[in-house]
Image: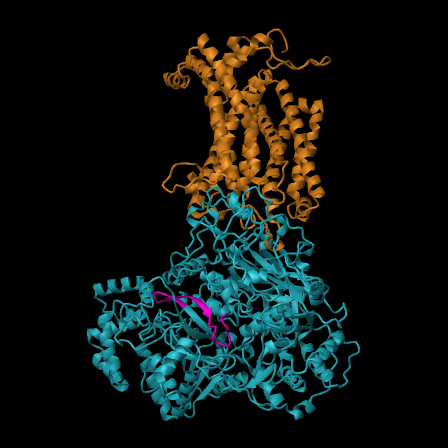
Chain colours: A cyan, B orange
Amino acid sequence: MGHQPHEKDPKHSPAGALDLAALRLELSGRSGPLYWRGLEELSDTPEFHELVEKEFPASHWTQMDPVSRRGFFRVMAASLALAGLAGCSKPVEEIVPYVRAPEVAPPGVALFFATAMTVAGSAIGLLVESHEGRPTKVEGNPNHPASLGATDVFAQASILSLYDPDRSQALTYLGDIRPWTALMIQVQMLAETQRMRRGAGLRLLTETVVSPVLAQQIQNLLRQFPEARWHQYEPVNADAVRQGAISAFGRYVNPIYRIEKADVIVSLDSDFLVSEPGSVRYAREFARRHSPQRPDFGAAMSRLYVVESTLTNTGAKADHRLPVLPSDVENFARALAAEIRGQQWPSDGVPYAELLKAAARDLKEHRGAGLVVAGRHQPAQVLAWAHVINQTLGNIGSTVVFTEPVEAQPVDQLTSLRELLSDIDAGKVEWLVMLGGNPVYNVPPDLGFGERLQRVPARMHLSQYPDETSALCHWHIPEAHYLEAWSDTRAFDGTVTIVQPLIAPLWGARSAHEFLATFGDQPDRPGYEIVRQYWRQQHSAEFERFWRKSLNGGIVEGTALPAVNVQANDRWVAQQNAVAASAQTDKLEALFRPDPTIFDGRFANNAWLQELPKPITRLTWDNAALVSPATAEKLGFSHKVGFQGGEHGQTYADVGEVTVEGRSVRAPVWIVPGHADNCVTLQLGYGRKYAGHLGTAIGYDAYAVRSSANQWSAPECTLRKTGERMQLACVQFHHSMEGREPVRAASLEKFQSEPDFARAHEKEPAKTFSLYPPYTYTEHAWGMAIDLNACVGCGACVVACQAENNIPVVGKTEVTRGREMHWLRIDHYYKGSLDRPENFFQPIPCMHCENAPCEPVCPVAATVHSSEGLNDMVYNRCIGTRYCSNNCPYKVRRFNFFLYSDWKTPSLMLLRNPDVTVRSRGVMEKCTYCVQRINAGRIRAQQQDRYVRDGEVVTACQQACPADAIVFGNINDPESRVAKLKSTSRNYSLLADLNTQPRTTYLAAVTNPNSEVSKGEEFGH
Amino acid sequence: MATEGPVLPKPAERPRPPVLAPGYTFASVTDKISSIVLAQPQAMPWMAGFGIGFLLVMLLFFSIGYLFFVGVGIWGINIPVAWGFAIANFVWWIGIGHAGTLISAILLLLNQKWRTSINRFAEAMTIFAVACAGLFPILHLGRPWFFYWLFPYPGTFQVWPQFRSPLVWDVFAVSTYFTVSLIFWYAGLMPDFATLRDRALTRTKRIIYGMLALGWRGSVVHWERYEMMYLLLAGLATPLVVSVHTIVSFDFATSILPGWHSTIFPPYFVAGAIYSGFAMVLTIAIPLRVAYDLKDFITMRHLDNCAKVMLATGLIVAYGYAAETFMGWYSGNLHEKFMLVNRAFGPYWFVFWGLILCNVIVPQALWLRRVRQSVPLLFLLSLVINLGMWLERVMIVITSLHRDFLPTSWGMYAPTRWDWAVLFGTIGLFVALMFLFIRFLPVISIFEMRALVEETSGGSD
């Protein structure tokens, strides 16, 4: 995998524009300044007009000769064919080596290119599938330390953002379309003015910068303009991590956890399995260790304690989970530190004392193999205490290591932003350049960013979407998607990946590198050159070899940051007050968290992420204010199902008014068993005003009540019932198993005494108990095993399935009617008490039953058994009786009640996987086990006259799964991984008593509770 | 016809009303019935009734047009409730269509003379009800334009229907039933067409009725062959009465869904079908005999008999409910037990208790002779039973689907305005067709009534 970029004809250019390529070459061959001056020289020639039109399709209206009717039609035709044209075009620079007949890439065979995606200062390495020049699917890069071959939901869904027709398609000045040259002139003029004043009026605002190239560009810029300032801000940042490390160690070091080495983990409100930097890797490591029987790992099963306020995926996987008030997490951390350090602390009457002491004993018993993890949304003290405890227990260097920070220039982002704002107040800022970010939307409202921004005389904003910030800026500059532009980035451990594009910018967008280049003396420098030049400086020896290797492998070797020695700062520890008794007040606290699917709001216009049910609440298209059942009861909130779609779609929640520090917002209140009492979780990212067609004006804006002083939790808030009700699209209202035990679980103790507990009490009908003769499978027989112990419920598999299989989104209204189309869903169950339930996730794809109930009822044989045991769906034969769905006990079938697939938007057509039919209205569809991948694997095997090797065919869900919970393969081969897993004692079939004989089976969950914790603390097995 | 057969024992105490009021001659019977077609009395009420039906037909056409244009998503169906009103209505209409063939074929073979005055319109009712029913399986398809793939035709695909599917059996059962019912009906109409031809006042009518009469001259040879054919057709139609709803019940019974998967379904569906069919016969007969002064032909004897049939089949249906409930409990199966509780106390409790009220409790009034003799009460009861049977279909289809095996996929169904539009549209179609039938064809078999004259001229039976 990965391509070998090698030297090729530099004249290579998009199809159909060969004559222009020569001109471009001629132009780019000149030195920068010459070209710059050459603008005037060239501007009157027809070639120049043509070039500009080609370069800036969206700007053609300003360029066009008004009387040229032919020109008009040409442009019209070009616009219509725009997406197709762009789809055929490749980046101008050499990434796809189509020089002559491309032997390596025959049409129809996908190529994979290594690249990386950065979210909130942390990158994940990816391999992106490309079909004839259009990227169609994102996979994890197995070489990359943050991926290990898996991905998170954001990476999976990022491919949709690439083709999102709502992305900026034109450079605008005050809303009017302008050519790139106009911007260049403007930048040069402003730069000229600033240069005379040593850049005193220039300010740069970026998000967290981890790109070495961008950092160097900014440093160069600051050298040119010594009095200019660079500020960084994004709402989900590492401020607390930085401050916590400074408190504990005296300097900013970046913690990297070795979950695989940890026998005992105590999480202080850290969702390290899903939403912290590196969580894709952590989930994999955790799944391997938190397993009673993984053939590949010998060590004992690990144990996870989670102390948190809102129920996260990590909390759901805990062996002991303690819901506490946000303000109590710090008390817990202090008490835990005291307990471990052998100090006295007032434990009388503290409800969690027993659990805390048990956890402390556990940690002490596993010195060097225990780990305390604190979440990045916690106050710095909590992070510092976690570091101190780890140091005390000798865990540093073993289960946690520290490196230099990943950020190019770590700053306290809030302070940085405040400095910028005070400079604006002081009238010092004349020219504000924002690279990415959306501060008008996501800066705490007490800082009044939007209002102050408008006092800046010149404002430029580079962003992928015309958003809230763009609306208040003079210049809006379309930013290239990461699949469209060259860049580089760092992962959570510092590993650098060179970000290579897979497609030329669809709408002529530019990267931050290219935009910053306009400040210098080579304003039209392509990003490719910028990135290459930087790395040539770093690796001058054998550069081409280095470059090719780095691109091919997806990582720059040796860039992972080395561990540094740290020593806890005893003075800080000494300064800390004694453990405070937990404040048991009736005050309601507020908690702010990024939304699980649209994050800080940047993915608001991504339909896949909007329609991905949020883990646990299973809401789509909306955020909600989450409260515990007891708090909801106290405040009089409830939710109920509607009649249309009902439990599987339409729900009504009471709307509450949340007031934090005098600011209010109205939010639907959603009840989450397991949430801490007396606090409310507000999810950031919704309530966007300018996000695109999909993301605008849905949900409520939690930023509106988030103050700069209390960014992640507010000590006091009020929640008042408004009497209104709001319709929410919730795909699962019942979280109780109703005695049916779809998920089976036991404690490790029980599992050891009764290894086949999952099947022991089940009467499975005889396999021959059918009127029809059994099928025989001579070659392959595909099957799947899903380890419920491993699944963290992140949803990456669901988005991966959607991307792989061209699954349409249906929108909120259709979801409320119970018609969402996901082939794979992750059911969530509670077990035990309402206040402290156990949680289980269960991914449900098609079971591919041996006795499939759907097959005999189809009147037209549109769903049939394949020779390899798949339950095939023949779309073009389906007439849509929906009988198969009625007879499916797992309800995995999905029906196109309307024409859900987008057959109109040109850019979305490029997105489609060419190996999968795009379904039309009126046909049934369902999980195929990624039959297109099976077929590709079988063809490959047949060409080589062999069976398909184990692991050669992976389904999209399996490939995306961070926890390696899904294993697919040939069950006819007893040596295959899936066959081995199916032969383990934990293996059971869902609804086995129906004698459907599913091919998809589950491995029962096993928890590892501490026997010292009394049953009262435990959540009842 | 006039063969000797077992005769119902006569009640000693109370003389039963005759099947034809005394005092009629051949000529007066013919006059009375044919005048409805030829003289067209009650023109204005007819126009009003037909007009209502016609408007609803327009609603039906409109909603079908929109349905075909946009897709079945306009209905309330979803996953898990992928079948909604369409299938419930289908089963309901098919059930209604049962009474006609039962009356004309089975009662003919059993030599029940009281069938004579109601069989014609009951058969018409059957055909129209089956026509309404037949719309739904096509309308409810995701891709209705491919409905013909359900037939085993030699196509270029070389793919046949999947014969294990009960939906394919449905196609054969329903289409056979419709065909045989239509032929049976038409055969019965032939002598009357000849009568109308002979009595028609205009040339157009004479030509049309003449063509429809297929050259019937009433010769002895005609009559002899006719009687033979009619008996054979009756024999052919008889098993269909049982088979159609049995096969329709297989749509449910062969599935694995709790609430559907039940061996009691075939007899219980057939009984339910006759139950609702007779209710619809009464719903039609009662206004008909008032509007066209046919009380002498459709006597209290007929109404009483229909009521008794309803009572008997209603009890079978009630037994079906009881047996289903018992078996659900007795099975010890978690899903079956849950289904029963959910039916009665889940979100759709009102459907269940509504049908118990309409189908089981209220019809017990039929035990009382006073009720059976009260025409308004019978009419009311017939409407209640029609509603109850419709609720039963809705309960079977929807409450079984909405909460099945995995709690995570439970859902709800609510009909949209388009669901209602199609339901009332087909009711409109049925009404409109009935009105056209009354207007253009003899609603009571003239020649068979004439055969009764001889017998009744002396008194009862």
B293 with respect to B153 (left or right): right
Q: Residue furthest top?
A: B458
Whether residue B44 is visible to the viewer of this picture, yes or no, is no
Whether residue B437 is visible to the viewer of this picture, yes or no, is yes
Magenta segment: A129-150
Residue A383: % across, % down: 62, 82
Total number of numbered discs in the rendering = 0
Q: Going 70% across and 28% down the picture, which residue do you hit?
A: B365
Q: Quadrant of the C terminus of chain B?
A: top right
Question: In front here: A665 or A504?
Answer: A504
A1011 with respect to A278 (left or right): right
Residue A340: % across, % down: 72, 83
Question: In front here: A555 or A437?
Answer: A555
Question: In front here: B297 or A759?
Answer: A759
Q: Residue furthest left?
A: A45
Residue A129: % across, % down: 41, 67
Quarter of the figure with residue B5: top right
**Can you say whether A249 is above or below A59 in the image?**
below
**Can you say whether A129 is above or below B262 in the image?**
below
Q: Going 75% across and 86% down the picture, which residue do you hit?
A: A343
Q: Going 48% across and 11% down the picture, which residue do you hit?
A: B224
Residue A149 magenta-highlighted: yes
Residue A468 magenta-highlighted: no
